[in-house]
Amino acid sequence: MKHEVSPARYWNIKECTIPVGKVTIIANFCKGGDDCDECIRFCPEKVLVRGTVPNERGYFPPVLVEEEKCTVCGRCQLYCSENAIFVQKIGERTVTPEEIVVREENF
C-alpha cells in the first residue's frame, strides 16, 4: 500500500524556488525511436515524448510537452549520445510545498 506524503508536513517552509529552463532539440541530430529514446526514458518529469514527425534521417525526435514542468535537471542532455538535446536554466519560479510532488524514481 502506497501512502501519500505531503512535503508541507515535514518542511517548515512557506515557499521555495525551482529552476525554470529551456530545452532545445536539434531534430536532425536525433536518432530517437526504436534505436534510442534515452532522453524520454530518463526524464524524471516525463515532459518529453516520442515525436510523430521523422527527421531527415528517418528517426523520430522527442517533443517537449508541458515545458513548465521541466526542472532543468539535465538528464536528457546527459544521456543523449547524439548531442541532440540541450537544457539551459533561464530563471526560477516560486512554488509552495503543496505544489511539490513526491515521487519514487525507478530507473
Image: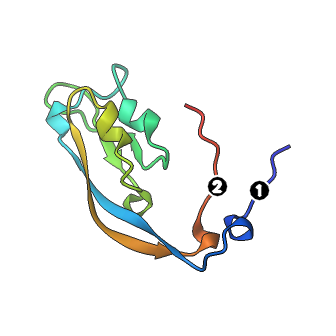
User: As drawn, is 107 to the left or to the right of 51?
Assistant: right
Relative image position of residue 74 (x, y in whole percent):
34, 45
- Residue found 34% across the figure and 39% down from its top: 76
Q: Is residue 7 left or right of residue 91?
A: right
- Give amino acid for label 2: Val
If the image is split into quadrants, where does the C terminus sit? top right
Q: CA distance from mark 2 to mark 1?
A: 8 Å
* Residue at mark 1: 4
Question: Which one is nearer the viewer's eye here, 21 or 66?
Answer: 21
Quadrant the N terminus occupies: top right
Q: Residue at x 13, y 30 (%)?
A: 56
- Check disc 1: other Cα within 10 Å, few if <14, some if 14-19, many if 20+: few
Q: Are marks 2 and 1 in contact (CB under 8 Å)?
A: yes
Quadrant in the picture for residue 52: top left
Q: Secondary structure at mark 2?
A: loop
According to the picture, the residue beneath numbered tag 2 turns out to be: 102
The extreme bottom residue here reads 14
Of 69 and 100, nearer the camera is 100
* Disc 1, SS: loop
**Mark earlier in primary sequence (2, 1):** 1
